[in-house]
Image (spheres, rainbow, N blue to C red):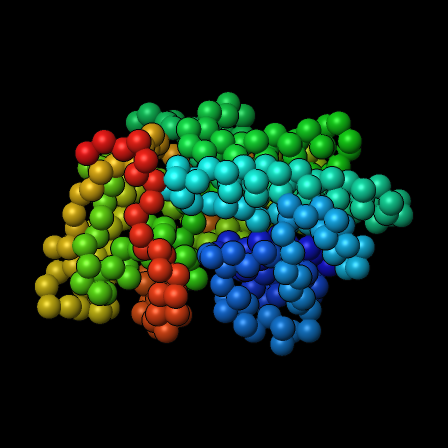
Amino acid sequence: MKLLVTGGAGFIGSAFIRHVLRTTDCVVVNVDKLTYSASPEALEDAASTGRYTLERVDICDGAAVAGVLARHQPDAIVHLAAESHVDRSIDGPGAFVQTNIVGTFELLQAALRYFEQLPAERATRFRFHHVSTDEVFGSLGAEGQFTETTAYSPRSPYSASKASSDHLVRAWHHTYGLPVLLTNCSNNYGPYQFPEKLIPLMLLNALEGKALPVYGNGSNVRDWLFVEDHAAALLTVLRDGAVGRDYNIGGNSERRNIEVVHTLCELLDELAPGTRPYASLITHVTDRPGHDQRYAIDATRIRDELGWRPRESFESGLRRTVTWYLDHLDWCQALQAHGDARRRAGLRGATA
């Protein structure tokens, strides 16, 4: 099988490609624009397999995407390319509309034309797997979980753009017959995550003795999913999922943000002790505008229908993550070329 993966140099995309190359004999074509958060280093060993090709293409360029499809003739598309940082979407929503909505539209158009010219036998096997987020569902109260039938209620420019892309994918299935799969995942963490996200931001700041900025009172709750578990789930859905069906992917690991930071500090105290406890660096800062209170995923469907379960608990996954970062500080140092890698964004409209 040949897979075309969009956004494969990103955090989740690169983990998915590594998993595919490690566990299958699939050939992978990575279509990536290589934006600020891309990490080609995460795929340094991919070329040595002889089953990996990088195409530096913007998914908003429909003609270029069509050319890639014509050249490589994939059996499936796994669509991960997206602008993904909520804070950045508050400051600059235009890029999110362009990549997440317009880019998905252009990709769907190219995929549909490609699908319609496939021989019948290949068309039967073709899949378009769209990877999305639990943020499209909005914010939960103290109880309950998101299911595949939860109504959409996006609250940020990022989640609104992802919700829009989800609706486009479903429309191309129902209107044009494109064979799609759609997954919505909870918060990912793990190796090679760009340090604008909570866990790598806190980890690197702590190691440098900088403040650990927790939004508001830190009571916001997220369900945490180790990225390698997510990669395995995506491959499971691609292989065995029912066409037109949605699958929620979660780690069954709800934690308040402040708990996540304290657990991380305790691990660093053990694995890289400093002159004082890292928790002493925690500070509380102005909250993100419109910060959703709680996300929680009900992953019953993917468990019961496809047999997938996360292998890592939050504690074991976080330990693996911290160990990886401590062993790859050179990669982290290279990110300093991105002067705003850890700069606070998304304060527009915030009140002190």
In depth, the one of 317 and 181 nearer the eye is 181
Q: Residue at x 37, y 73 (%)?
A: 330
Answer above or below: position of 194 versus 172.
Answer: below
Report if residue 67 is visible in the image.
Answer: yes
How far from the left and from the top, in percent, is residue 148? Answer: 54, 30
Q: Quadrant of the C terminus?
A: top left
In depth, the one of 94 and 23 nearer the eye is 94
Q: Residue at x 59, y 56 (%)?
A: 33
How far from the left and from the top, in percent, is residue 180? Answer: 69, 39
In depth, the one of 35 and 292 nearer the eye is 35
Answer above or below: position of 294 versus 255.
Answer: above
Q: Quadrant of the N terminus?
A: bottom right
Q: Residue at x 50, y 25 (%)?
A: 152
Report if residue 76 is visible in the image.
Answer: no
How far from the left and from the top, in percent, is residue 202? Answer: 27, 55
Q: Residue at x 50, y 69 (%)?
A: 41
How far from the left and from the top, in percent, is residue 100? Answer: 56, 40
Answer above or below: position of 102 versus 342.
Answer: above
Q: Quadrant of residue 175?
A: top right
In depth, the one of 225 and 29 nearer the eye is 29
Q: Quadrant of residue 108?
A: top right
Q: Which residue is farthest bottom?
A: 48
Say left or right for 295 vs 39. left
